[in-house]
Amino acid sequence: MNANPEVLKQHLIDPEICIRCNTCEETCPVDAITHNDDNYVVDASKCNFCMACISPCPTGSIDNWRTVLKPKAYSIDEQFTWDELPAEQELDGAPLLAAALEPIDATDAADDEEALELDASHLADPLSGSQVPPWSASHPYVNLYGHKAPVKATVAGNFRVTALGTDSDTHHVVLDFGTVPFPVLEGQSIGILPPGVDAKGRPHHARQYSIASPRDGERPGYNNLSLTVKRVTSDHDGNPVRGVASNYVCDLRKGDEVRVIGPFGTSFLMPNHPDSNLIMVCTGTGSAPMRAMTERRRRRIDLDEGGRLMLFFGARSQKELPYFGPLMNLPKEFIDINFAFSRDDGRPDGAPKRYVQHLMRERGDDVAALLRDDDTYLYVCGLKGMEAGVLEALEAVCAERSIDWRALHAQMKREGRLHFETY
Ligand code: A2P
């Protein structure tokens, strides 16, 4: 806390490291974080230092602070223009930090603590999922390569994984790192720096993609990984746009060099211990981490480690579902697959769409049986709207079977057993 009431330890986001993934803005319980086309910024008049945004940030760019005089706090408009964080300021020749760290008397400290408690007390935990990994997850490496020193990967393959002639042009892209260390785990992501500059002449920001291959490589024993990338051709309102990074990645050819940063992600990780069950819920390219985890388990099938896999996968149609063919080839006793097709299941006009959350309710008995097992880990990845739908489905599944979802939800979050990555 600040000793000097005129001094503020201002919360800022480093624009050089931020990958604009929106996680902080979604997480902030008081809407202190906002963004424009360039930067994500923190409104000093709203931020109450609750720290809810710190751990979900995949890059650590959120954890930056500058000591300023309160009236001179950086405005959000100022922050929108930054390419890098400003240097720490000085006050009358003395660094502001020293002013902020003057000894605090006991009364002040008690007041501050109370203020902090009061600030945090009205905040229900804003996050639906865990901020910690499963207890048996492997330790992830993160931020090995940043914007200033990205690693160069070579494209080893690029092919379409949705049927031709559909709107969903989704690609499976394999990147090889040669002899450069780039250790990853299932559930982690990387950033890709598209070449060129934006309309303002600034280098494009990195775009984050989930890794679709297991830790030992897309090709086992090779230093490579795969991504699942959908070509963006329209914005959220359906207006035509050409997504800079997705089109760049989908058009890559074998042998091309790509600038990569990362890896990112410390909690959306899979358990390693025998008999752990995975419930995986995804839509579209949200299937990437599910493919990684499933493939990890498939490669170890002969070890007979136990544990059930249950997958709920939503797409507009079978033809637009990435990896449909390979998924159908997996043995039924290895994985319980449930597809939700929203646009082509022959339902009558006007009938409600079929989404993953509807299927979860239909399979409620089996979902509940897994939820009753303390060794079950649940992962959700894909469209943002799915998050609320899945939570409602879980609540309903539990309510219909006399399971206390409120308590179970809290327990699963605490135990690193409930993970969301939605966008
Ligand atoms: P929809 O037919 O309503 O678009 P996309 O192809 O855009 O990546 O979407 C993948 C699937 O997710 C589609 O079937 C889409 O259905 C579905 N979807 C859209 N909104 C939601 C939601 N709120 N919850 C679950 N699934 C959704």
Image: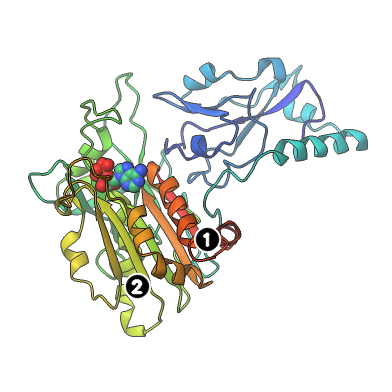
The residue tagged 2 is 297
- Classify 258 as above or below 394: above
Whether residue 260 sits left or right of residue 250 in the image: it is right
Crowding near the residue tagged with mark 2, few <14, some 14–19, many ≥20 C-alpha atoms within 10 Å? many
Q: Residue at x 26, y 63 (%)?
A: 218
Mark sitting on residue 3: none
- Classify 384 as above or below 16: below
The residue tagged 1 is 133
Crowding near the residue tagged with mark 1, few <14, some 14–19, many ≥20 C-alpha atoms within 10 Å? many
Place residue 30 in its image quadrant.
Answer: top right
Whether residue 31 sits left or right of residue 283 in the image: it is right
- Classify 153 as above or below 299: above
Say if residue 112 shows up in the picture. Answer: yes
Where's ligand 1: which quadrant? top left
Quarter of the figure with the C terminus: top left
Q: Residue at x 72, y 26 (%)?
A: 8
Q: Residue at x 64, y 27 (%)?
A: 88
Say if residue 158 shows up in the picture. Answer: no
Number of numbered labels in the structure image: 2
